[in-house]
Amino acid sequence: MSKLNQDELFRVVEYSADAAERIGYSNYSYWRSVWQNFLKKKSAVFMALVFIVLVVFSFIALRIGNYPNYAELVSSPTETFLTPNSQYWFGTDNIGRDYWCQVWFSAQVSIKLALVVAIGEAIVGVIIGCLWGYVRWLDRPLTELYNIINNIPTVIYLTLVAMIVGQSFTIMAVSIIATHWLVMARNVRNLVLMYRDREYNLASRCLGTPVWRVLSKNIFPYLISVVILRLALSIPGTISLESTLSYLGLGLGFETPSLGLLLRNARNFFLVYPHLLVFPAVIVSLITVTFYLVGNAVSDAADPRNHV
Amino acid sequence: MFKYTVKRLLQSVLTVLIIVTIVFLCMRALPTDFFFTEDQMMKLDDQQKEDILAKAGLLDPIPTQLFRYYGQVLSGDFGTSRRIQNGTSVLEIIGGKFTISMRLGLTSMAISLTLGILLGVLQARQKDRLMDHVGTVYTVFVNSVPPLVSYSLVLVFGSRVLGLPSLYSNKNIGMSSILPVVCLALTSIAHYALWTRRYMVDESTKDYIKLARIKGMSTQSIMVKHILKNAFVPLVQYIPASIILTFGGTLLVERFFSVPGMGTLMVDAIQRYDTEVVQTCVMIYAFLGIIGVFLGDLAMTLFDPRIKLAGGGETR
């Protein structure tokens, strides 16, 4: 026995994900549980269907309309303010352009912008939020940065960006992401701070689990529901912000129509011609309301505390 | 307490200083072309433009400009406007707009606090029954429908059905303020209702409520004496901030109803390179924000004596 030295008695085990999982909950899959929990809520499933149908239809609608592309729209001075009829399904606006095409096109632009912003915000926010919460020395500088950025009204940034850089879809998306990641990062940071020093993470760290694995396997599942909730709020939020900015003339340029631009044009007329308000308002509200409700339901379903 | 207040005050002065500096630098990043009106842009040649800019001190090195501005503010001079109202002092312009925004803001706050908390209490009392569902539908609507759409609906209903004026005018302040105030209140009612309901529902599951019920207290007095009082504490923290922030006006409502208030002033000023107006506005916003948070903390200690601000070893 004494002849055996330290190296022969103990052997360093190679880290293997398989072996680590072997003692885990049998047959449990996180995403399957999320899916099952979500399906239990019939109203949310219905809302999700409405949302998907709307998004898909917004593409079909342009094809079956008179003008498949916004650039091809023609104005005709003789056909202004027509109410909906068999040729112009949503009527025409103040310079005689087809409203059907404008409404669906702007709905698409809004959805695209909201999705791009939501994804960008989630990626930047989660990464910075995790670092902010997990790396101790980063806490102070990032908190100060947060206080400063948070105290300057968002409108200033966006106005300045619109004036210095210009107005386009990409610029708009980037500048919204550049201010909105803060909220996500802050939420994530608070959660990471809560879970960072729990016993199971201490144990994990003692067993030599690498940091990225602690973050991705031990902490991230707790974040998913909060991240999804933020996204659910962020999409209606972005659509609102975009419409507000475009209404003020600070949003997308004139060549990309959006809800804000439509209503900005219609502001002086819709008291007399209500169809200019009703169609864009109903469609955009349906999109935001359904997404908001679906997001809330998914976020409930994604909370691991509600599983099993 | 005193030491804490002073420390916090100094910190806020530093924050405001940083913010003003950043905004100052951002404004200088704008091309100087915005300094001129379209008319001037066409008529003046380059040399004349240079002269005007040099006279306004805009061609000096940025640090010189910055320190000159600090000195100016310290001596209480916030400068004069160039483009919004030529030659009028910034404080005078802001003063006029401030009152308009404040009047609208305070009215809508008073309405939304009363109605919002009332709705929240009703929802919490009738949890999972009709009133609760009505309130939930309302909050979902307000939270998810873009404000531009809901304001348009208010406008159509207000002016077509009730015959109210659709634009704000100085001649008929009372009537023409109704729609803007309703729009402002629309969102904050939902906000207060949501949080009142949530805190009250949280509170009502606690043990001491059970005890009060066992003692034989009526639901009515449990609601008012215990639940509402306790649920009000977390809520009260945000009330001063939101009251104070209404002084700053809201961009969309003011633009939508053509209210000549604070909210639209800043965007106009940025677009016209009226740097001193922008800087003063930002300073005011930052101060209002900081004071709001501070008053909120104070209010919380007043409503709940267990909370102490100066307590050592606090974790954020």
Image: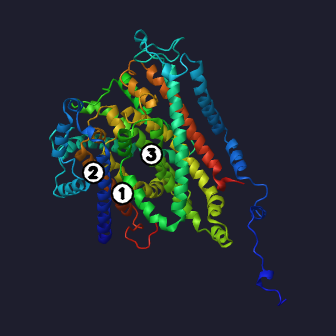
User: Which one is nearer the viewer's eye here, B118 or B252?
Assistant: B252
Residue bearing mark 1: B293
Tell which tag, 2 or 1, sits nearer the viewer.
2
Residue bearing mark 2: B284
Q: Earlier in the sequence, mark 3 or mark 2?
A: 3
Q: CA distance from mark 3 to mark 2?
A: 25 Å
Q: Is residue A179 above or below residue A250?
A: below
At label 2, counting other C-alpha atoms closer than 10 Å, the crowd grade (few under 14, some 14-19, many 20 or more) is some
Residue A303 at x, y = what percent? 63, 53
Circles 3 and 2 on the same subunit? yes
Residue B46 at x, y = what percent? 21, 36
Query: Is disc 2 in contact with disc 1, using a CB cutoff of under 8 Å?
Result: no
Q: Earlier in the sequence, mark 3 or mark 1?
A: 3
Tell which tag, 3 or 1, sits nearer the viewer.
1
Residue B147 at x, y = what percent? 43, 36
Res B191 label:
3
Circles 3 and 1 on the same subunit? yes
